[in-house]
Amino acid sequence: MDRPARAPAPPPGCVFCSIVARRAPAHIVGESGSALAFLTIGPLREGHALVVPKRHVVELTDASSTEASELLALGTRIAELQRRRLGSQGETLFLMSGRAGEQGVLHLHLHVVPRSDGDGLDLNRWWNERVATASPLALEAVARRLRT
Ligand SMILES: [Zn+2]
């Protein structure tokens, strides 16, 4: 179900709003009804794209369900293009939301990073060094809090 969009006024300095409005230069690679994709100026790998809602949405929880769906749908299209045209074999998606989520630019954005075997990004090692092991009891306690 789509909820009414909470619509904070876009801050005048929002670079992603400027790109959406075509007031700032960007290498746009895709567009849908509510989302726009362009290459980041700081790529982890060649073809690394950002997908943003066209409306100034700050955090994931501010997005309508349509905006969230279109963000992932356009990200999927970009991943297909990266595979077909750039020869990538997979992709890594990042979405940092909120200051605690280490979101940099405060306009929601999905990173679509094209990946190839042996490209050296090595995220599994990073991940494995940080994960904890949760007991079934602890998992059930958290699940109970999250269920509606
Ligand atoms: Zn914005």
Image: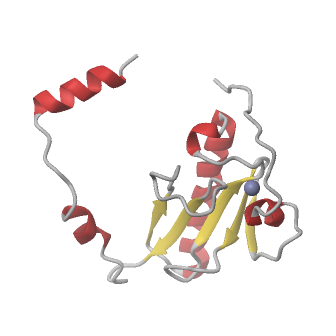
Question: For this rendering, which residue is in front, 131 or 92?
Answer: 131
What residue is at 64 percent from the left and 56 percent from the top? 106
Q: Is residue 5 above or below residue 49?
A: above
- Residue 12 location, quadrant: bottom right
**Picture quarter with the N terminus:** top right
Q: Position of residue 73 (x, y in %)?
A: 62, 50
Q: Position of residue 25 (x, y in %)?
A: 82, 77
How is colour applied across the structure in the image?
secondary structure
Q: Is residue 41 above or below residue 8?
A: below
What residue is at 74 percent from the left and 63 percent from the top? 16
Question: For this rendering, which residue is in front, 32 or 85?
Answer: 32
Looking at the image, residue 54 sits to the left or right of residue 85; the answer is right
Question: For this rendering, which residue is in front, 132 or 27?
Answer: 132
What residue is at 63 percent from the left and 50 percent from the top? 71
- Residue 89 location, quadrant: bottom left
Q: Position of residue 107 (x, y in %)?
A: 67, 55
Count numbered badges in the picture.
Answer: 0
Q: Position of residue 77 (x, y in %)?
A: 63, 59
What residue is at 57 percent from the left and 38 percent from the top? 61
Question: For this rendering, which residue is in front, 32 or 107?
Answer: 107
Looking at the image, residue 72 sits to the left or right of residue 126; the answer is right
